[in-house]
Image (spheres, rainbow, N blue to C red):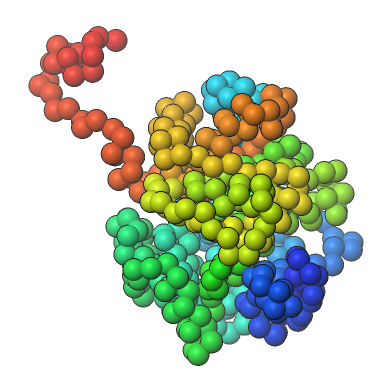
Amino acid sequence: MTAYTGVLRCPRCAAERPDSVDPFAVCAPCDADGYHVNPFPVYDLTGRSAEPDRTRPGVFAWQHLLPVRADASVVSLREGGTPLLPLPRTADRLGVNGLYLKDESRNPTWSYKDRLIAVAVTRAVQEGAETVVVASTGNHGASAAAYAAAAGLRCVVLTLESVPLTMKVLMQSYGADVVALRQAPDRWTLLREGVLQRGWVPLSGFVNPPAGSNPFGIDGYKTIAYEIVAESGRAPDVLVAPAAYGDGLTGILRGFDDLLALGVIDRLPRMVAAEPLGPYTDALANGFRPGATVPARPSAAFSIATPVATFQGYSAVTRSGGSAGAASEEEILTEQLRLAREEGVYLEASSVVPVAVLAKLRAAGVVTADESVVLLGTSTGLKDIGATAAQLPPVPVVEPTLAALDVAVGGAA
């Protein structure tokens, strides 16, 4: 049996409802107050253990702590189990004694979205769904398409015409029905119509202002916290994650909540929202204002370039005593190449925003040298090589002589 009680609870007002009633809708009382808030699964952890069952695949090693039935099959591509990599050269440069990267690019579709989607699709299958739908600029859609294929479900992906070709190819290759829209809010409008009129199961959010993704899927991210503590033996002092709509921040902190309640750890890490545009930084400075936006601009970190913060993301930061920070385009692209050259890890632009933000937090004294820090690397740089290529010189073509090689590379080694 799982610890899930079949109840959803609002993190803002604590209103509860059974998951059989509008499971993907925002909290009604908060909505009446002007807040779009994602309710979350409630668990009874009495007598439970954080020990994984390694006979179960992927994130379902912790199936007893996830919002899915224990008596039905799961949809897994052996996601999770990603390495916690030390970053010694980056740590020296930033002045942090203990710095690690949770490298989520090792997942089946090369992003951490696989954890969310594995749980959300499993839940959809267990509830008898035939079609799943997602609004995505890439990683979320690629993962949804892959897991829907594994489950034998139809998948509809609503993306933007501006997303890189690599992302579109990935989504289409897994067999999803992929269409592009010109404006991001149009995706949510169309998705909502599919959910309400055709009974499609949403794997992402579909309200505007945003609230967050499928609440069952978000708890798939709890397993990141479980793995970090299982490998390191403790919770880090600080965890820095790309922010977007706060799904990752929220799910990971919920995992640490479980471990705290179970007595595995004795404190929560401070969660840091790393972002390119700064809505969480603004919310921390001025208070959370529903629908408040900051100026938008194009960014290589397009998958998290949202001008609006969600309540769930804001809550994860404030409840943990955390902070937020924004990075410029130049800082993001510089850190992408620097991390690859310092540590041998090539991540997408969104994934290196935490490195740039950590540098600022260290300079400001928000993070101290003796604290342990985990950076969340959400996806591989191969998802958008165009942004990286623009920062690199052309590869020279040379004659097959050492003299020609020396000229091309600037001298003999």
Residue furthest bottom as drawn:
197
Image quarter hosting the C terminus: top left
The picture places residue 174, in percent across and down from the top left corner, at 38, 67
Q: Quadrant for residue 159, please give it.
A: bottom left
Q: Residue at x 55, y 73 (%)?
A: 207
Residue furthest front as drawn:
286
The picture places residue 398, in percent across and down from the top left corner, at 13, 23
| Front residue of 100 and 233 | 100
Give the tally of numbered discs: 0
The picture places residue 121, in percent across and down from the top left corner, at 56, 72
Q: Relative to 159, does residue 237 appear above or below in the rendering?
A: above
Q: Residue at x 77, y 39 (%)?
A: 234
Q: Is residue 222 left or right of residue 261?
A: left
Q: Is residue 216 visible?
A: no
Q: Residue at x 46, y 39 (%)?
A: 328
The picture places residue 208, in percent across and down from the top left corner, at 54, 71
Q: Quadrant for residue 265, please give it.
A: top right
Q: Is residue 17 visible?
A: yes
| Front residue of 16 and 226 | 16
Q: Is residue 145 left or right of residue 256?
A: left
Residue furthest top as drawn:
412
Q: Is residue 157 left or right of residue 252?
A: left
Q: Relative to 138, does residue 96 appear above or below in the rendering?
A: above
Residue furthest left as drawn:
399
Q: Residue at x 61, y 67 (%)?
A: 211
